[in-house]
Amino acid sequence: MNRLPPERKSGDVMSVDLKTSQNGNGVVTVLIEGDIDMSSSTEVRTHLTDLFEKKQKAIVVDLSKVPYIDSSGIATLVEGLQWSHANKTKFRLTRLTPMVKDVFEIARLLTVFEVFDSNEEALKGI
């Protein structure tokens, strides 16, 4: 199945919205809304870095509202995974959209990350 990024006009600047909620006991969920691409990956990286610096026990990233991700977005999430290993923090991804899941599948990252179908599933065992 061929999934293409959303249509954009030349010069369009896409933004990303990041909503963080505390689940208690040092566990946070980050809902990302919008494309994670060259224009927004720095903002996502900064947000995740701030959370890692706060020494969270676990970070759950909800990708249910991410229609498109490019290589810079993937690199940002891989960095998050590396930070999680360095800080002994759980880093889990949830609710991947079909387009995002295809990209992770092609890059063979579905077995590298802890990926869950729901936030509730991801929070179990933390």
Image (tube, helix red, strand yellow):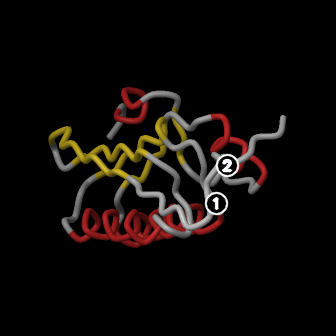
Q: Amino acid at mark 2?
A: Pro
99 left or right of 15? right
Residue at image point 63% right, 54% down: 112
Q: Which residue corresponds to mark 1?
A: 70
Q: Is residue 46 above or below residue 94?
A: below
Residue at image point 74% right, 53% down: 108
Q: Quadrant of residue 60?
A: top left
Residue 27 is situated, as x and y percent measured from the top left of the image, at 24, 46
Q: Is residue 9 above or below residue 21?
A: below
Q: Amino acid at mark 1?
A: Asp
Residue at image point 55% right, 67% down: 11
Residue 123 is situated, as x and y percent measured from the top left of the image, at 34, 35
Q: Which residue corresponds to mark 2?
A: 5
Look at the image and tell me in which quarter the N terminus lies. top right
Q: Secondary structure at mark 2?
A: loop
Q: Residues within 10 Å of mark 2 (few under 14, many from 20)?
A: few
> How many numbered discs sit on the rendered protein?
2
Q: CA distance from mark 1 to mark 2?
A: 9 Å
